[in-house]
Image (cartoon, rainbow, N blue to C red):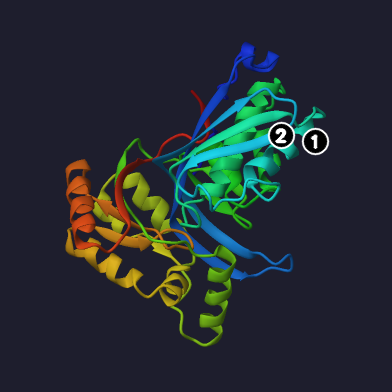
Amino acid sequence: MTEAWGPDDDDDQQRRGASGPVRVRVPAKVNLHLGVGPLRRDGYHELNTVYHAISIYDELTARRGDTLTLTMEGEGTGELALDDTNLAIRAARALAGYAGVPPHVRLHLRKQIPLAGGLAGGSADAAAALVACDALWGTGLSRDELAGIAADLGSDVPFLIYGGTALGTGRGEAVSPVLARANSWHWVVAIADGGLSTPAAYAELDRLREAGAAGPPLGSTDGLLAALRQRDPRVLAASLGNDLQDAALAMRPSLAGTLKAGEAAGALASIVSGSGPTCVFLAANADDADRIAAELATAGVCRQARTAHGPVPGARIG
């Protein structure tokens, strides 16, 4: 079941274009269900996924400028390319081309979402750039129009325009909101040292399946969607699944120890987030999440353990 997305948060000033800086906060995502189908003719896999936005954020500030530039601080500084390969830069150019305006903006990124962590940090930054530049330039596009541009940038980018919890199909770019009773789920996010390549994870899954070494495909999202509507974390815990987890564990065997440590600390469920290597744990409540995060940090099985809740909105000004 789905419902319409909420109203845009555009206002009259945004449609005229902002004179001062525009600051956008954008969340990370996890996949509560990530079913990976066969390889398509376009080189992507067919996906059947349930996206969920959680309260770990990047922040992007857009200011008027004479050229297009990107600077950053925080996670990945010195590692993340700030040239035309960066998704935030590509997003600004794509919006400028769509709207017929010069791609002139100074972008500054404060990054907390880890690089190549399975949390869609790059896609989040692209979504933030679309929302920020739309406000700065006064292009006045709707969320749906921004999501249309986002679909050409990456499979996860449209979801992060909207946020919340949503069903993703196609290669993940076709999103529709999930109708679920109001609830906040509590998570512990275990961030690993280093990242994993998403294309490499999909290739590894294909190899494992060809060798008969992968688990059975997840299939339908019906069970997960029904669990969300029940508002019981124990029911949701039994429904989480990720077809890419086998690939992530094959590429980074130490993640098995991280998952086991979270379960030993009392998590209701443990799962690799997306293509990994971030591991995510569902907690019964906020207090349990705090305790599990502390135990994971003490156990030394991850670089950092953070608590988060979801669902939260997608890229938003403010």
Q: Going 57% across and 70% down the picture, which residue do you hit?
A: 200
Q: Is residue 220 visible in this depiction of the protein?
A: no
Q: Residues within 10 Å of mark 2 (few under 14, many from 20)?
A: some
Frontmost residue, 150 versus 224: 150
Q: Which numbered disc covers residue 132?
A: none
Q: Position of residue 18 (x, y in %)?
A: 64, 16
Q: Going 55% across and 22% down the picture, which residue do you hit?
A: 9
Q: Amino acid at mark 1?
A: Gly
Q: Going 44% across and 39% down the picture, which residue do you hit?
A: 57
User: Which residue matches tag 1?
Assistant: 97
Placement of 69 over or under 153, stated as above or below: above
User: As drawn, is 269 to the left or to the right of 318?
Assistant: left
Q: Secondary structure at mark 1?
A: helix
The disc, 1 or 2, on the residue closer to the chain's N-terminal end is 2
Q: Position of residue 223 (x, y in %)?
A: 40, 58
- CA gap between label 1 and label 2 equals 13 Å
Q: Amino acid at mark 2?
A: Leu
Q: Spot the residue most to the front.
A: 78
Q: Secondary structure at mark 2?
A: strand
User: Which residue matches tag 2?
Assistant: 68
- Foreground mark, 1 or 2, reads 2
Q: Spot the residue most to the right.
A: 100
Q: Position of residue 271 (x, y in %)?
A: 35, 62
Q: Going 74% across and 69% down the picture, which residue do you hit?
A: 41
Placement of 110 over or under 216, stated as above or below: above
User: As drawn, is 258 to the left or to the right of 53?
Assistant: left
Q: Is residue 304 visible in this depiction of the protein?
A: yes
**Quarter location, residue 48:** bottom right
Q: Position of residue 290 (x, y in %)?
A: 20, 45
| Count of picture labels | 2
